[in-house]
Image: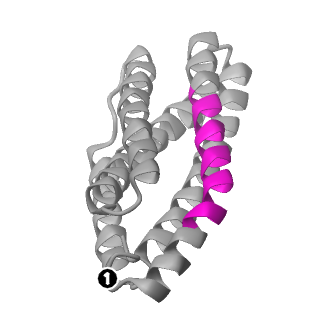
Amino acid sequence: MSKTPSGHLLDWLRDAHAMEEQAEKMLQAQAARLENYPILQEKIRQHLEETRRQAILIRGCIERHGSSPSGLKDTGGKLMAMLQGLGGSLMADEVIKGSMASYAFEHFEVSAYVALIATAEFCGDIQTRDVCAQILEEEKAMAKWLAQALPETVGLFLTRDSTETGSAKR
């Protein structure tokens, strides 16, 4: 049986909530491990606060539809983030792989919010559309910042990796 557009909207809002929960865990782990890249660490911490607020906003959209976030999806997202963080911590170039993964994840979030905005508009849910549009701009801004910061981060990593022992990784 196919779902109604509102049913899809609710499912995708739950997915977005789980995505933000996953992002929170990933950002938390990344910020805690970044020791020698203070500018990147500070930006990650700022986006962590945005991400926490975004999860609250999405929860509000879900609750306006008379439902609640999916505990299973949220737990699955958190588990994935934990495994990603563990895997990243084992790499000699953790800061670079983490930056690349963050950039890719931001674009995944951008696409999710573009779809949510279109679905909310289709359903006539202006409040959800506006919340998602606000979050979309924050995700785009973070993706842009990461793209602009990556060359400098790579340069710092390469310099440190060739001249210092152990400080380049994170």
Q: Is residue 90 left or right of residue 119?
A: left
Q: Position of residue 5 (x, y in %)?
A: 64, 30
Residue 84 sits in which quadrant?
A: bottom left
Please rate how many residues cluster around mark 1, counting C-alpha atoms within 10 Å: few if below 14, some from 14 to 19, many from 20.
Answer: few
**What residue appears at the point 73 percent right and 30 percent down from the top-left corner?**
118
Q: Which of these two is toward me, 65 or 113?
A: 113
Residue 113, image quadrant? top right
Residue 145 position within the rendered picture, expressed as x and y whole percent measured from the top left: 62, 45
Image position, residue 45 (x, y; %): 36, 42
Question: Does residue 151 sit above or below 75 in this rendering?
Answer: below
**Amino acid identity at mark 1:** Gly
Question: Is 149 positioned to the left or the right of 68 in the image?
Answer: right
Mark 1 — residue? 166
Residue at point 32%, 58% (across, down): 76
Would you say 113 lies left or right of 17 here? right
Viewer-side residue, 116 vs 42 = 42
Q: Is residue 132 visible?
A: yes
Magenta region, main secondary structure? helix
**Where's the C terminus, which quadrant?**
bottom left
